[in-house]
Amino acid sequence: MFDNIAPKYDLLNRVLSLKIDILWRNKLVKWMGEDSPKLVLDVATGTGDLAITVQKKLNSKVIGLDLSQKMLNVGITKIADEKLSSEIEMVKGDAENLAYEDNKFDAVCVAFGVRNFENLEKGLEELRRVVKDNRSVFILEFSKVEGFFGPFYQFYFKNILPQIGRLVSKDTRAYTYLPDSVNAFPFGEKMKSILLETGFKSVEYKKLTLGVATIYKATK
């Protein structure tokens, strides 16, 4: 599915989020910057947006990992255009079976990727395994909008967004799958509990844009 939408993925992210996804990534990187990481693993990197932001703002060495080779190919071209190929390495790999030793990275991040893990707990355990002790995993993920704005957002999310996504990407599954996967995914306190049960010693989170997305900082 992600191979199919790779050519239009960045365009759709900007259109469907009204470019707010850029602000969300910047907030994650600003929070990560408090730890001054030198080596960062960006899991489910997709086309490398978060990896590029981390490198530019924190001057870190970044490894971007994803299962979709076509998404990685788009990212490799973007990184070359930014003249960052020596600073960002794009690697095909499985988040639930990372080919890295324990305690390797100063920080690990995932933007809109943990929702797609086949086994959430196994994937989170892998993220925890490869980050150094007393360092953190940063997760940016969609969450459910609650309160007055909730019904309006749900209508957009379930009815309008998939139509736009289908029109632009020509893939009938991708943007129907998105609202379904978000609505089924744990968020807020429930996600915090899962992270703590996975073995992280502390978890903080920040809601973004009325709760449309949330950043979690889970410290090993």
Image (cartoon, rainbow, N blue to C red):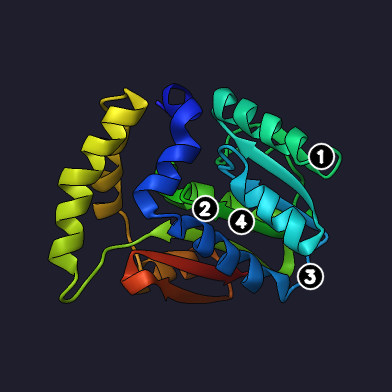
Foreground mark, 1 or 2, reads 1
Callout 2–callout 4 Cβ contact below 8 Å: yes
For disc 4, the neighbor class at 10 Å (few under 14, some 14 to 19, many from 20) is many
Going from N to C along the chain, the mark reached first, 2 or 3, is 3
Which amino acid, mark 1? Lys
Quadrant of the image containing the N terminus = top left
For disc 2, the neighbor class at 10 Å (few under 14, some 14 to 19, many from 20) is many
- Report whether residue 106 is seen: no
Work out whether residue 120 or residue 48 is closer to the camera in this orientation and state it.
Answer: 48
What is the spatial separation of the Cα atoms under label 3 and label 1, in whole angstroms? 22 Å
Q: SS at mark 1?
A: loop
- Please name the residue that numbered disc 4 is placed on: 109
* In the image, farthest residue toward the right: 86
Q: Is residue 174 above or below residue 148?
A: above
What is the spatial separation of the Cα atoms under label 1 and label 2, in whole angstroms? 23 Å
Image quadrant assignment for residue 67: top right
- Please name the residue that numbered disc 2 is placed on: 111
Going from N to C along the chain, the mark reached first, 3 or 1, is 3
Horizontal side of 91 relative to 151 (left or right) equals right
What is the spatial separation of the Cα atoms under label 2 and label 3, in whole angstroms? 19 Å
Which amino acid, mark 3? Ser
Going from N to C along the chain, the mark reached first, 4 or 1, is 1
Residue at (74% x, 68% y) in the render: 133
- Please name the residue that numbered disc 3 is placed on: 36
- Please name the residue that numbered disc 1 is placed on: 83
Horizontal side of 13 relative to 48 (left or right) equals left
Which amino acid, mark 2? Ala
What is the spatial separation of the Cα atoms under label 3 and label 4, in whole angstroms? 14 Å
